[in-house]
Image: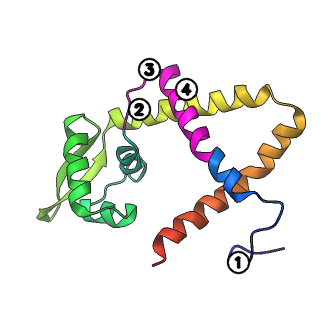
Amino acid sequence: MTGPEETGPVPAELDAARLASVISPLRRTLLAAARAAEHLPEIPDAQIEIVRALPRGTVSGPGELAERLRLSRSTVSNLLTTMEGNGLVERRPRPGNHRHVDVLATPKALDLFDRFDLASGDLVARAAATLPAEDRAALAAAVPALERLRDALAQTKDTP
């Protein structure tokens, strides 16, 4: 069995272009359906990434967010200003160092994301229930591989 650290040619049975062409529309369709189901506001992807980087109970500095998300500091600063105005994040002086700030997701943002995640899971479960058993089994088996693919793609962002 090939480990995650081993690389090699893409197997002939994997149509990588076809997989890539399905992922983005699938994500957009799910996002739109979950927004509609929960009457959620449209939140730009970059803002979603920031909230996802600030799970409940965590704080981070703007520079740390910029580095983690591979965005410029000015981009993160502008995003945080907009998000703070929309009640999605809060900036607080860092204890013991008032020249720096800590950023945290607000209860409003966390509630929106909890509602989105619940709606998304419900929508996927209901849609999957309409598929043949072998498709549902294939989807279940694919989840770990898709998680590893996500992680591998994230690592490519870290490679010059």
Instruction: Give the left or right position of residue 43, taking residue 10 as reference.
Output: left
Viewer-nearest of discs 4 and 3 = 4
Alpha carbon separation for disc pair 4 and 2: 18 Å
Alpha carbon separation for disc pair 4 and 1: 36 Å
Instruction: Give the left or right position of residue 83, taking residue 154 as reference.
Output: left
Viewer-nearest of discs 2 and 1 = 1
Q: Which residue is mark 1?
A: 7
Q: Which residue is mark 4?
A: 33
Q: The magenta stretch spans which residues?
A: 23-43
- Give the x, y percent position of residue 4: 70, 73
Which of 115/158 is in front? 158
- Give the x, y percent position of residue 6: 71, 79
Labels 4 and 3: the sequence-earlier one: 4
Residue at (23%, 44%) from the top-left corner? 90
Label 4 Cα crowd, 10 Å radius (few <14 / some 14-19 / many 20+)? some
Q: Which residue is mark 3?
A: 39
Residue 111's tag is 2
Residue 112's tag is none
Alpha carbon separation for disc pair 4 and 3: 10 Å
Q: Amino acid at mark 1?
A: Thr
Q: Are marks 4 and 1 in contact (CB under 8 Å)?
A: no
Q: Are marks 3 and 1 in contact (CB under 8 Å)?
A: no
- Give the x, y percent position of residue 111: 41, 32
Label 1 Cα crowd, 10 Å radius (few <14 / some 14-19 / many 20+)? few
Against 90, residue 32 (above or below) is: above
Label 2 sits on a secondary structure element that is: helix
Residue at (52%, 34%) from the top-left corner? 31
Labels 3 and 1: the sequence-earlier one: 1
